[in-house]
Amino acid sequence: MNNENKVLACVDRSPHLDNNIANTVADAAAWAASRMNAPLEFLHILDRHPEIGSSEDHSGAIGFDAQEHLLKELADKDAEKTRGMREAGRLFLNGLRERAIAAGVLAPDTRQRYGHLEESLAEQEAGVRLFVLGRRSESAETTQRELGRNVENVVRALHKPILTVTENFKAPQHFMIAFDGGEVTRRGVDMVANSPLLKGIPCLLLMAGKPDPEAPKKMEWARSTLEKAGFSVSSEIIPGDTETVIARSIQEHNIDLLLMGAFNHSPLRKLLFGSRTNELLRSAKVPTLLLR
């Protein structure tokens, strides 16, 4: 295996929620790593400047000795909290590592680092084949943690495929490509055809939106490319509101993985980066693979 082609699962340990999302990310990442025979790494981002909360009152005028003692006390508390965060994160990552091993992944790696989510992932990108992130569903409890809340910012910062998942991941049985005939989704079709990730899983090619006289020709290319790679493919061209058509087709065809493009010049750009996409990602019950 090439360590420069790993699956990177970015996981979140929130004190306000249980670990359902983290477990889901671990399950999805383990599935992807196994399918692609790729190394798996779990990455946990720690806050760069953890806040120290205390009920003690440090206000008022104090002498130099008392001030020096207070600063040392606060520094000691800060160091103690940092050690506690790192230890809690280590145990959290070890649990996910064991979960991935139980799913059949050999020697998954773990890493903790301080920083901001987008910057940290962008720094890792050169060695990553697929990112896996969690996102909160509409019914999920509000959290101030970055994962899920800033999916759009992460997508803007990265250029590799990003698999975003909600609760209770299961291995996909049917996947759909939201195909617009543009450069990004054409590259996506090529990627699917040449990757072991989705081999053997039936595919629905869906073209939605404004009527396009070139649509049948574009769809025939995509269908032929996938069928030559051994995929079982069905295709549909459905005019109408893109988000509505995608959501309805997911339900009607029992789709459990959606692939869609994410690029500035894609006709799906407004869908991906507009508020409507945020609504789609929040409400969708299926994992979504965003292609760059």
Image (cartoon, rainbow, N blue to C red):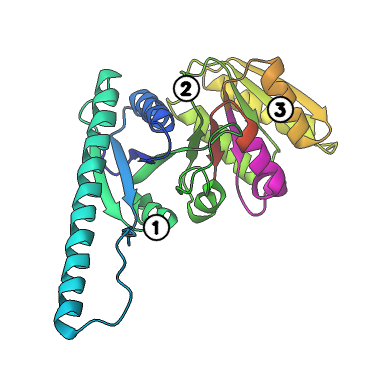
Q: Secondary structure at mark 1?
A: loop
State which quadrant residue 232 falls in. top right
Mark 2 or mark 3: which comes first in sequence? Answer: 2
Quadrant of the drawing holding the N terminus = top left
Estimate the x, y position of residue 165 in percent, counting from the top left: 50, 32
Amino acid carrying mark 1 in the image: His
Q: Which residue is mark 3?
A: 247
Q: Which residue is mark 1?
A: 116
Q: Secondary structure at mark 2?
A: loop
Mark 3–mark 1 Cα distance, whole angstroms, equals 32 Å
Which residue is drawn at the image coordinates 48% and 23% (left, top)? 198
- Mark 2, residues whose alpha carbon is within 10 Å: few (<14), some, or many (≥20)? some
| Between discs 3 and 1, the one toward the N terminus | 1
Pinpoint residue 61: horizontal percent, then vertical percent. 29, 82
Q: Residues within 10 Å of mark 3 (few under 14, many from 20)?
A: some
Q: Which residues are magenta?
A: 258-281
Q: Is residue 209 left or right of residue 98?
A: right
Q: Secondary structure at mark 3?
A: helix
Residue located beneath label 2 in the image: 168
Quick check: can you spot residue 242? yes
| Amino acid on which disc 3 is placed | Ala
Q: Is residue 26 one of those drawn in magenta?
A: no
What mark, if any, has residue 83 been given in the picture? none
What is the x, y in percent for residue 241?
81, 36
**Residue at mark 1 to residue at mark 2: CA–CA distance:** 27 Å
Image vertical order of residue 158 relative to residue 3, above or below? below
Residue at 68%, 49% (x, y): give it: 269
Q: Which residue sits at x=29%, y=62%?
A: 56
- The label nearer to you, 3 versus 1, is 1
